[in-house]
Image: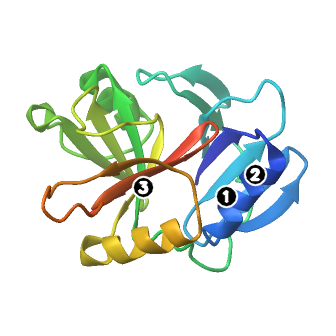
Amino acid sequence: MLLLESPLVEIDKSIAFYTKLGFEISQEKDGYLAKENRFAILLNSSPSSKAAIHLYNAEKTKSFHGPSGILIHLIENECPYALGKKQSILGNYYGVSLETDSLENSFNLRNELGYKGNYTPNQGWIELNKAGHHLSLHQTNQCPHSFFNPSLTFFNAQKNKEIIENIKQLEVPIEEEVIFSVEEKIAQNIITKRPWWSWLFHL
């Protein structure tokens, strides 16, 4: 199982952020868990916490920084946290996205960790999968919008505008609106951001 970790900054605002988006919140020994039925985020209250990816059922427990600069915790044990019972309002979850200076090094590392996919560097990104967990690797500066590393990605096709409007009505902080049509002037993608974490939406 893959678990995401985010430093817990401004507890009340952080919990309000996830609650508005439809996450269940549970208090854990390390802080809080923001969870829905597809993934969970550990909001770690430790002063030493960093944005990180936890991979459970690993061959050996160790921590290191990957080529993307993100901290990776490999843990031999089963994940101690349960997922939530319902989905958030964010739509069709498409996994974790990482921006990296070296697609080759990031691809090789993920292969070693059991992720499968084709090495296709010419398009500027690579898609990998492990037991249903999708991971996208992006070459640095290839995305036409802000990129917060790591990000969670949601593809919602025609429903994206409706979901974006719902998020705006909830007054969730939006870092960037991506508008492709000058005439229409309606955001087709948005990036929402809370301290140390971001959500990336694609149409």
Callout in the foreground (2, 3): 2
Where does residue 15 sit, x and y in percent of width and height? 76, 57
Could you tell me if residue 177 is visible in this image? yes
Any part of residue 83 in sight: no
**Quadrant placement of the C terminus:** bottom left
**Considering depth in this image, is 163 or 177 the residue closer to the camera?**
177
- Seen in the picture, residue 35 relative to 180 is either above or below; the reply is below
Q: Earlier in the sequence, mark 1 or mark 3?
A: 1
Q: Name the residue under label 2.
A: 13
In three-dimensional space, the C-alpha distance between marks 2 and 3, rounded to whole angstroms, equals: 24 Å
- Mark 1 and mark 3 residues within 8 Å of each other at the beta carbon: no
| Quadrant in the rendering for residue 119 | top left
Q: Name the residue carrying label 1.
A: 17
- Which residue: 41% across, 20% down? 67
Task: Judge by depth and name the residue closer to the eye, 167 or 46.
Answer: 167
Q: Which of marks 2 and 3 is nearer the N terminus?
A: 2
Given the image, on which type of amino acid does mark 1 rest?
A: Phe
Task: Check disc 3 and report the residue beneath it.
Answer: 95
Relative to 176, is 101 on the left or the right? left
Q: Where is residue 7 in the image (x, y as percent from the top left)?
A: 72, 36
Residue 110, compared with residue 168, is above or below; it is: above
Q: Quadrant of the N terminus?
A: bottom right
Place of residue 94 in the rendered image (x, y in percent of width and height, measured from the top left)? 38, 60
Q: Distance between the residues labelled 1 and 3?
A: 20 Å
Up-down: is 179 above or below 102? below
In the rendered structure, the answer to whether residue 4 lies left or right of residue 146 reads: right
Q: Specify the amino acid type for callout 3.
A: Gly
Residue 69 position within the rendered picture, expressed as x and y whole percent measured from the top left: 48, 21
- Element marked by disc 1: helix
**Residue at figure coordinates x 12%, y 61% from the top left:** 183
Q: Which numbered tag is attached to residue 75?
A: none
In three-dimensional space, the C-alpha distance between marks 2 and 1, rounded to whole angstroms, equals 6 Å
